Image: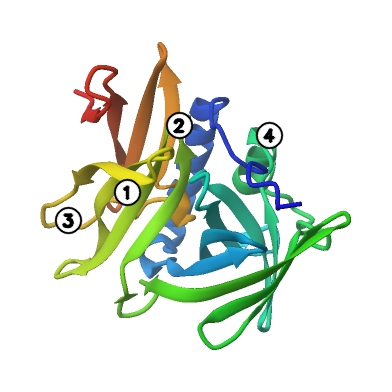
Amino acid sequence: MTPPAGYGELKFTRGVGMVRQFVSAVFCLLLLSGKATAGWYHVENYEGSIGPDPVHLSLQTYSFGSGITVQGSYFYDAKQSPIALYGKASGAGLALCAIADDEEFERVIVMGKKTGLDTAGCPFSLELGDGVLTGSWSKGADKFPVNLRKVAGLDDTGEGKVEGTVEIPFWAQTATDRFAGIYTKTDNGICMTKMQVINKKRKEAIQTIKFGGDLCNAGMLMTPIYWNVQKQTERGKDIISVNFYDGRAGYEEEYVSDRKTKKYRLKK
């Protein structure tokens, strides 16, 4: 039996407005407390396998609240559907849980818990070595080895550093596409310089949306880096929102899917 590759795939179709209002309020509080300018992106990307299945995994370490010190996103190469992760780091050990649905995403990622979240039953039990993550994924009677190697990383909590090609698998997705942010260190800092639209079935980028200018602020707003692109549906059309940092509450640009061209265009 192979791991349930579809487990934890999020649709993000409910409560988008409420989530945005809540996040905007929290972000304003962080700005007033002076925490927003410190830099909160320490991210490491890995490639490898869970059992026989190839996977890509990305982890961000930060104190997210509710006792969570790690959030992430991973996908099975065969399905290309990002799955949100959360968990705790203890020394070199990592306990990671996968978000199962929209309700759990809102409860864990958006709202959190004052008493903290228990990760004792998390399926991932991993150990961090020299550029590798090893351990196991288990659920019930099923258990599979996990073997991953680091391929890229970024850190804007200090002077700013980027290693390799940093591709962030955003949590947002549609039935046909996922979205990957390419983060680069420029003369103006670290930011997302382009976003790739990756067709899940073809497993390749079908569109690249570039971000430029002197601000270098695309994909730098939300505390979890994987939440800097969000998805909603209006009148049957998928709309992808890209977040930008501007020193205040931030702003967004919306891209609407065009049924004829199968591309996303900037909403005017």
Residue at 42% from the left image edge and 13% from the top image edge: 236
Q: What amino acid type is highlighted by mark number 3?
A: Leu
Give the alpha-carbon distance from disc 1 to disc 3, as whole Å: 14 Å
Where is residue 123? Give x, y as percent.
Answer: 76, 59
* Kind of residue sitting beneath label 4: Glu
**Callout 1, which amino acid?**
Arg
CA–CA distance in space, label 3 to label 2 = 29 Å
Badges 1 and 2: C-beta atoms under 8 Å apart? no
Q: Is residue 263 visible?
A: yes
Please tell me which residue lies in front, 43 or 160: 43
- Point out the frontmost of discs 1 and 2: 2
Tag 3 near tag 2, CB within 8 Å: no
25 sits to left or right of 267: right
Q: CA distance from mark 4 to mark 3?
A: 35 Å
Q: CA distance from mark 4 to mark 2?
A: 18 Å
Check whether the beta carbons of the residues at disc 1 and disc 3 lie within 8 A of each other. no
* Residue at image coords 22%, 44%: 208
Task: Answer with left or right where residue 136 lies relative to residue 192.
Answer: right
Q: Secondary structure at mark 4?
A: helix
Instruction: Give the residue at x 67% y 43%.
Output: 7
Residue under label 4: 103
User: Which residue lies under the disc numbered 3?
Assistant: 215
User: In front: 8, or 91?
Assistant: 8
Of the image marks 4 and 2, the number of the one nearer the N terminus = 4
- Quadrant placement of the C terminus: top left
Q: Which residue is mark 2?
A: 174
Which residue lies under the disc numbered 1?
A: 248
Residue at the location (64% across, 57% down)? 86
